[in-house]
Amino acid sequence: DTGVSQDPRHKITKRGQNVTFRCDPISEHNRLYWYRQTLGQGPEFLTYFQNEAQLEKSRLLSDRFSAERPKGSFSTLEIQRTEQGDSAMYLCASSQWMGAYNEQFFGPGTRLTVL
Amino acid sequence: AQSVTQLDSHVSVSEGTPVLLRCNYSSSYSPSLFWYVQHPNKGLQLLLKYTSAATLVKGINGFEAEFKKSETSFHLTKPSAHMSDAAEYFCVVSDAGYGGSQGNLIFGKGTKLSVKP
């Protein structure tokens, strides 16, 4: 257990529905990252926050995706109008950013299945 | 731009024999390199990290990796495999080096390690 938790662990939804995932990072960490992992691939970066500010978004993050980190604590990732191609494991990680080094601690992930 | 290439998608060894998982990297500047392990239905766990200190890095569970700048490699080794080592291993580069500010991790495609009794 790394101290990063994600909820739910599994989500099955029908195409076109909206889904929201939550990530609770290690409490003293100022950075929070979202990644997506599809079957047989390594995780791919989606977006990250430093405190409450969203500083970077990947091209993978279409306009159907939105992420927030109110008050710089937990974060939510929402997918609107889900598509079958959104089926993946969504991973959250947190770190204490101190410049040149960035060890990230990962949560167990939320597995999304879109029918 | 940073990237990593894991040269084997699947490695199979017998218990008690050495493990070698190969990784080459590409980076515009001095990289931070990591190996993560992912057991089935479990989260990613950091095995070891290289951050421009010693080139031979020791990690958990007897794993180690050697940073070779001339070969742009960061191979993961273990002298003697254990059944519990069976998992997916990811070589990772971070752009959190000199001039990099994001710190997001760039993963290889992974190497699945099987350990036969």
Image (tube, rainbow, N blue to C red):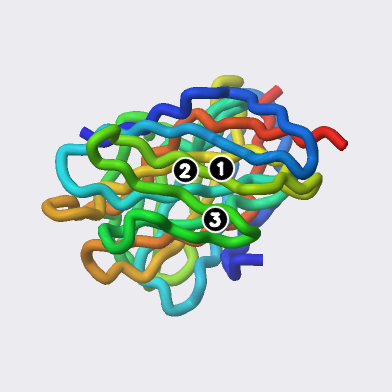
Q: What residue type is labelled 1?
A: Tyr
Mark 2 surroundings within 10 Å by alpha-carbon count, few (fewer than 14), some (14 through 19), many (20 or more) = many
* Residues under numbered marks 1 and 2 in contact, where contact means CB atoms less than 8 Å apart: yes
Chain letter of mark 3 equals B
Q: In this view, does A6 lie to the left or right of B85?
A: left
Residue carrying label 3 = B47
Label 3 SS: strand
Q: Which amino acid does label 3 sit on?
A: Leu
Q: Is residue B27 left or right of residue B33?
A: left
Residue drawn at (43%, 38%) of the image = B107
Residue carrying label 2 = A35
Do we see residue A51 in this rendering?
Answer: yes
Chain letter of mark 2 equals A
Residue carrying label 1 = A90
Residue A41, given in percent of the width and then of the height, sits at 54, 28
Image vertical order of residue A70 relative to residue B45, above or below:
below
Residue A61 or residue A89, whichever sits in front? A89
Mark 1 surroundings within 10 Å by alpha-carbon count, few (fewer than 14), some (14 through 19), many (20 or more) = many
